[in-house]
Image: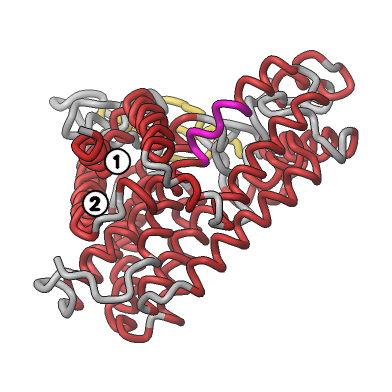
Amino acid sequence: MILQTRKIFSYLFVLIPLFLITGPAIPDIVITTGGLFGIFYFVYLKEYKNLIKINFFRLTIIFWISIIFISFFSHNKTNSFQDSIIFIRFLLIPIFCYFLFLKDKKMFERSLFIIFILVVFVSIDTLYQFFNYSSENGFGEDLLGFKSSWYGRLTGPFGDELIPGSYVSKFGMLGFVFLLTNKKFNNNIFFQSIYLSTILLVCYVSGERMAFATFSLGLFVLLIFLNEFRKSIFLSIIIGSLLIFLTINLHPFYNDFKIIESTQFHQGQKIEKFFKCNNESEEICSKTINVQPSFRQIIKEFNTSAYGEIYLLSIKMFLDNPLTGIGINNFKYLCDTKYHHNKLMKNYNCASHPHNIYLQWLTEGGVFVFGLFILYLFYLIKLILYNDSEKKYKIISLVTILIMFWPIMSTGSLIKNWYGISTFFIIGFCYCLSRFKNKLKI
């Protein structure tokens, strides 16, 4: 019975990348119930004795205890204790992926195939929505009927969430592993390059600057270190760059407006869009809308941009509470209730979190928790590097970790459902990928 239940949860864990497209609820239920079963499984079979001997598991538990410990010093203890205690469901995802649910090689190969199919689907769906465009109304519906409520932003199949670029950038390299291990595609340079260049294009047109920047960085790292597939990676960069160039010059989204005003503030670029008044007339109408400012404008006036004010407030909170931080999930609470913090948000409402993983742990956990988090990442990288697996798997795993944890970028909150589940699932997947000593055969 217990082995059958394990198999059921293994299939559910394989489908987490699919469940993430539906929103945070289903994947959260899966990892929570799967985590409870995993604990029961190790206790019932007394395998926990072997588990506690593993340094990565010990470090995971120490990190979890540390965020519970600093909750005693938090400003809003209810928020901090609540989110600290249930954070274990995220931290255990890599452990249960490696030692329980994705331990079987065939199950892992199935998950590679599913990730590849989903990345392709999200890419096609997002590009369909991108070309389903009118100057008057912006991007239309995707293949599933979803439409963005933000002019100029794409949802793909994610409903109201503007994250298709983030999804394909984070899972894209793992889908690439499928191509490298599949007999039909492992020597097909053209197919590999089309796959990677399409992801690059999707990251760009999605408007998610960090997804585009980190995936581009990942491609260049692969180009340097993945000698065996250098031709396909180089070709993907060339094709992707050409597609982006053509898109910028030919797609009306980038050419049917003039800039009226450009500031660094959120939605601070005011543009006038031009379009035909109706199909039966050549008369040109226009409307004024506000969109996100240009990257150059944000950098130029960074301190008063949305990110600048959030980051400066985060640093201020950390300096006021350097050892134990302000408490997990206390950022918005402190910003709303403390005037000397609230006044730093001059142009914006208080954000829910610091919008950077490293700043979040530093601000909410202090140097104590931040140091353990850096140690966690260091040990994860060490595990991948020193596992006796093929070089290409190590490199792709490390590049995927780099894409998720590049320090100079805006991120979601690791304690929130969707971002936390996707991040720690991918950590677990990279951990599993580093296990294989022999070639995967799909």
Q: Nearer the viewer, residue 212 or 300?
A: 212
For the point 23% across and 46% down, which residue is it?
A: 118
What secondary structure is the stretch in magenta mostly built from? helix
Q: Secondary structure at mark 1?
A: helix
Q: Amino acid at mark 2?
A: Ser
48 over 169 or under it: above or below: above
165 over 285 or under it: above or below: below
Label annotation for residue 135: none
Upstream in the sequence, badge 2 or badge 1? 1
Q: Which residue is mark 2?
A: 111
Where the N terminus falls, by quadrant? top left
Where the C terminus falls, by quadrant? bottom left
Residue furthest out toward the bottom: 227
- Locate residue 355, reporting x and y percent: 62, 38
Instruction: Say if the magenta span includes residue 88.
Output: yes
Q: Secondary structure at mark 2?
A: helix
Q: Which residue is mark 1?
A: 13
398 over 8 or under it: above or below: below
Instruction: Say if the magenta span includes residue 177.
Output: no
Are the residues flagged by discs 2 and 1 in contact, CB closer than 8 Å?
A: yes
* Residue 73 seen in this snapshot: yes
For the point 67% across and 18% down, which residue is it?
A: 79
> Is 37 positioned to the left or the right of 416 in the image?
left
- Locate residue 196, reporting x and y percent: 29, 64
- Locate residue 101, reporting x and y percent: 31, 46
* Residue 151 seen in this snapshot: no
Q: Give neighbour class at mark 1: few <14, some 14-19, many 20+ (Cα, 10 Å).
A: many
Q: Amino acid at mark 1?
A: Phe
Q: Magenta segment, which residues?
A: 84-91
Q: Nearer the viewer, residue 124 or 180?
A: 180
